[in-house]
Amino acid sequence: MQVVILCGGLGTRLREETEFRPKPMVPIGGRPILWHIMKSYAQQGHKDFILCLGYKGEIIREYFRNYHWNTSDVTLRLGAQPETLFHTSHDEEDWNVTLLDTGLETQTGGRLLRALKQVKDETFLFTYGDGLTNSDINATVKFHQSHGGLATVTAVNMTGRFGELGIDGTRVNSFQEKPERQDMYVSGGFFVLNKRIGEFLDGDSCVLEKGPLQTLSKKGLLHAYKHNGFWHCMDTYREQELLSKMWQSGQAPWKIW
């Protein structure tokens, strides 16, 4: 199943890092957080990625264009007949990565709308380039197929500043961006979407978390898969440090590979 990942935002709250690189390329344990997200999907069988680029997208292009250089030990033979020998193998040989320019100022819904041109099947996966989880993606897909709606969002129970979900059973009946309450289920991203969501997206200025998801919730077309395990975003330098310490200690809950 194809995976669409938003990689184009400015990441202004992580200015210490994003002044020099896009947020998905900020490292956790020496690898970009984007790599960690993709590894989690790939471990569960989803290896066809569409990366929606924007701010400093050329850095993401460079990383994947030179993936062997970035992940391997290398011997170079110089001279008239140069030769390159990569010593390190990796598990990403069968990944398919589409690098899609979705514009510098395009909003989240607009980036998704542009990506739909590359989506082959009716159902696909979608997430942001700054969140980590050990959620069961395939269980989310199975749940999505069972309810017949257009969208499933992974709901996580935590205090935060994210889009609050009003949940009746599994059906989402309200989607409120950045609410004031402290005890609530919030959107953790990691969506399963039907391609018909494009009917609710209206151009580059479209913010997915406002009009489209709110409309879907009012129509009863947005459902929540409740995940009570690990989920964490990387929105600030402190959060980057926390995730890095988890990785370095060998206790990174999202490492399922």
Image (cartoon, rainbow, N blue to C red):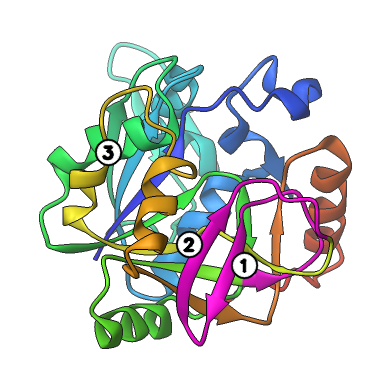
| Horizontal relation, residue 151 to residue 27: left or right | left
Q: Which residue is mark 2?
A: 190
| Horizontal relation, residue 216 to residue 160: left or right | left
Residues at discs 2 and 1 in contact (Cβ within 8 Å): yes
In the picture shown, does residue 169 fall above or below 60? below
In the picture shown, does residue 248 fall above or below 210? below
The numbered mark at residue 201 is 3
In the picture shown, does residue 27 fall above or below 194? above
Question: Nearest the camera: 161 or 43?
Answer: 161
Q: CA distance from mark 1 to mark 3?
A: 27 Å
View extreme (top): residue = 80
Residue drawn 81% across the image and 22% down it:
16
View extreme (front): residue = 218
Q: Is the residue marked by circle 3 packed among few (<14), some (14-19), or many (20+) residues within 10 Å?
A: many
| Residue 206 is one of the magenta-drawn residues | no
Q: CA distance from mark 2 to mark 3?
A: 18 Å
- Residue 245: tell me if it is visible: yes
Residue drawn 80% across the image and 37% down it:
236
Quadrant into which the C terminus falls: bottom right
Q: Which residue is mark 1?
A: 133
Query: Residue 159 appears at what percent x and percent y?
Result: 82, 62
Query: Residue 222 appears at what percent x and percent y?
Result: 38, 67
The numbered mark at residue 43 is none
Q: Is the residue marked by circle 2 packed among few (<14), some (14-19), or many (20+) residues within 10 Å?
A: many
Query: Residue 149 appears at what percent x and percent y?
Result: 27, 72
The residue segment tinted magenta is 156-181
What type is the residue that disc 1 sits on?
Answer: Thr
Q: Secondary structure at mark 2?
A: loop
What type is the residue that disc 3 sits on?
Answer: Leu
What type is the residue that disc 2 sits on?
Answer: Phe
Query: Residue 1 appears at what percent x and percent y?
Result: 24, 66
- Residue 257: tell me if it is visible: no
